[in-house]
Every structure is written in C-alpha cells, then in structure tokens.
Image: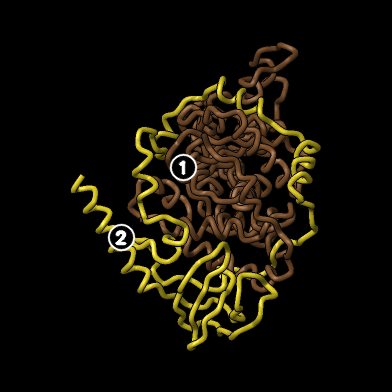
Amino acid sequence: MNKTLTQAMALALCSSLAWGTASALDLKGVLKDAVNEQLGTTNKTEAAATTTPQSTPSAQDKLANINWKNPSREDEIAVGRNVTGTILGAAPLVNDAQLQQYVNKVGRWVASQSERADLPWHFGVIESTDVNAFAAPGGYVLITKGLYQRLSSEAQLAGVLGHEIAHVVQKHHLKVMQKQALLDAGTSFLKEKISKNKLTQRAVSTGAEISARNLDKSAEFEADSMGTVLAARAGYEAYGLAEVLQDMETINNNDGSVALLFQTHPHPDDRLAQLSQVSGDQMDNISGGKTLENRLYKLK
Amino acid sequence: MIKKSLFWLLTAFACSQAVAAETGVALKADQLRADTFSDAKVVGSVNKNDAVEILNKKGAWLQIKAAGKTGWVRLLTVKRNSAGGNNVAGVVGVATGRSGTGKVVSTTGIRGLSAEDLKTASFNEVETKKLESYTVNAEDAKQFASNGGLSSHQYPYFTGGAQ
C-alpha cells in the first residue's frame, strides 16, 4: 500500500514538474488571489450571485460552481457525469437493457471491494467496435462493445472493470483535469478576464478527451495492479485482466480498433511484464477464484 | 470468393508460421506443472530469464518447454517474444480462436472511436440518464455475487516494486 502511495505521489510530482510554467506563475503570488477567485476557492457569494438562484441546482449550475482547487465529492461526480455524457455523445449505449444491468451488477460488486464503495457507481457498454474502456471521475465506467465481445468469462469482465475502478479510486483523471483548470486559470488571467463558468467549460470540454488521453504510464500500471486485486477480492479468478491483456497482444498494432487504446496505454506486453513484476509471488496467495464463463452475458 | 479463400489460406499460413516460432522468456523462476491447476504435479522448473518455447494456452495458463521439460505455468511467468503483435497471433491467438484482425473485419458498419471523435462530441443528456437508470445498488450486487458463488476476500494490494 505504501508503495502505491509512493507511486501516486511520484506521479503527482512528475505531473507538477511538467506544468512548471504554471507553478512559476503561481509562485510570484501576484495572481494568487485572482486565480483563487476564478477557481471558486474564495468569494463564494459573488459566484453564487452570477448563477441561477433556484433551490435545486441544475447539472449546469453544479458544473459552473466546481471548486477546482479542492473538488468535493459532488464536484467530482458532476465533472464525471459531464465527461461520460460527452463520450456517450460520441458513442451511445448498446440498446440491450439486460446487458447494461448485468455489467452494472458485476461492476458494482467489484467497486464494493474498493476504498470508494460509497460512490454511486455507473457502468455501461457503448456502441463501438473499438477495443477500449473509459473511466470518468465520480464512479462512471464505460466499456466498448468491441472489447466486451472479446471477453470469455465474467472474471475477465471483472478484471477490466477493476482497472477502470482503480482509476476512479486513485482520481487519476480528476487530477489531470484539475491541473488543466489551474493552468487555464493562471494563463488566461494574463490575457483576459475569464469567467469562472467559461473556465469550467474549458476544463470539462477537454475531459472526454482526457478520459482517453494518456495518463502517466505508472497510472496505467497501477490500475492494472489494483484492478487485479479488486477482482480477486470480489472472488474472481485473479488472472482475468492478465488474460484480457494477453488477448490484446494478439491484435495487430495497425488494426484501427486498437488505435486509440495503444495511443493512450502502454503496450499490453509491457503491462503484463509490469503486472508480473509488481505481483511477484503474491498471486500465489490468491486461490479459489471463480471464472464464471457460463454467466458472462452473451450479446444478442 | 476466390479472393476470400486465398485470404484465409494466407491467414492460416501466417498463423501456422507464427505458432511454430512462438518463443518467450521467463520473467521469474517458477515450477512447471503437469496440468492447469496450482496443485498439479511439478514436472520441472524454469529460471528467471530462461528462453522458453510456448506450446499451448488454456485460460490463464501457458504450456511451455524449458530446458527440455514441458509443463504448465501461469501466464504472468512468461513474456512472449513476438512483441508488437505485428501480423502474428501466435499460439495465444490461435488458442483463443482469433487470428489477428479476423474479428474486427467481420463487424464493420459501426464506427470506431478516435481522440478526434471524443474532442468534438457533445454531451448527450438522454443517454446519460439512460446509463444512470441501470445503476445497481450495493445490496443487489452482493446478492448477484452470492448467486454466482462469489464471496469477498481481504487481499492486500500488491507491494512489488515497479521496474
């Protein structure tokens, strides 16, 4: 666990080094107050006055009031909902209620084994021949039909969903989006006064792309490692995700269905080698996991 | 029709070539077992970095040949040499009934998903509400797990160092 923490911190450190320009601006302190204002960390009353004063805030209002510096659980869910809805704008859900319910049952059970079991987890299979899966902040997970069709057991599905659940638990995408918002807030102030609403729009509009964009390699390896354990905790055969990665190895690199996946993730070869390294002999302590081939929902 | 047959013939040829050439390297020391379960009889062993031949695949197990001995190991024990997936499905692809692009070619008509698609997509409230309508609560998921004979365990996260 310590190791995981260290990795996460190293990741955060690497990322902040990458955004060195923004930090330099911040350090000067001159812009600090202005930036804080834009990020919603100060001046709550002013921010509230500029939005609709209805008692039940709409999804748009929630988005406009996100505290990017220190997002609440509700902020995180609002962001994730927007990112997910945008992906769904590109590829809708597969029109099969039984399939969607099945994936939600498996996913919710695996998510219950995580440190963020309290999130309102949502899972969906989207209409795309691509082989890919997406996680968005706050507990949203999507998997493509193209990937689902390659699965041969419920344990493999649990492994894939476990990987995405781990991204949410570790807030991998949320952190990238926060940095984007902070950077925008810092640099845009130099050029123009930008409304907080616009700032959020910009951060969220890139969110769908971010959900697919390459995270730090170590974030992907960490999600493989944690996802494997989450599926094992749920009682599944621990090698489900490894089997899926091995299957992905057999897809030609030039195949269009994996173009985005291979752009945004380390190659399955490297992921398997890393998983082997990180798990060491600890896989041997896990036994009695179920594969449940027969319960895997067959697509119509 | 002739073209199609020729395609499959070539594909089959490419696969058989790949199968014959499938090799790998042991990522860690492990025992070779007579069958695909963890308490099957030990029939040999493999050392870290040993060159191995991959003969077969079954679930999360690979049948390998190392130093003249043949046996089964868990798939994380061996890294395949045919890295890159360029036109070789190999033993693994054949065992899973796939040969490279076969699966993908058969499902044309539905679009893929590029980074550009995601960048230009706009929020779909109807689909988002639909997604949320399928949400399952923790209690129902637990019941579903129990129906499948699944029970939860307290395994810690892996603590091995990254490379």
Q: Which chain appears brown?
A: A
In the foreground, A220 or A12: A220
Q: What residue lies at 59% left-to-right and 86% top-to-bottom?
A: B44
Chain bearing tag 2 is: B
Disc 1 crowd rating (10 Å Cα; few below 14, some 14-19, many 20+) is many
Q: Nearer the viewer, residue B145 or A204?
A: B145
Which residue has dot 1 on it? A146
Q: Is residue B146 left or right of residue A256?
A: right
Say which residue label 2 marks: B12
Q: Position of residue A66 (x, y in %)?
A: 65, 30
Q: State the hue of chain B.
A: yellow
The answer to the question of whether label 1 and label 2 lie on touching residues, with beta carbons closer than 8 A, is no
At label 2, the amino acid type is Ala
**Which of the pair A286/A180 is nearer the observer?**
A286
Front position among marks 1 and 2: 2
Q: Position of residue B4 (x, y in %)?
A: 23, 48
Measured along the vertical axis of the image, is residue A206 above or below residue B48?
above
Residue visible at 73% across and 44% down? A109
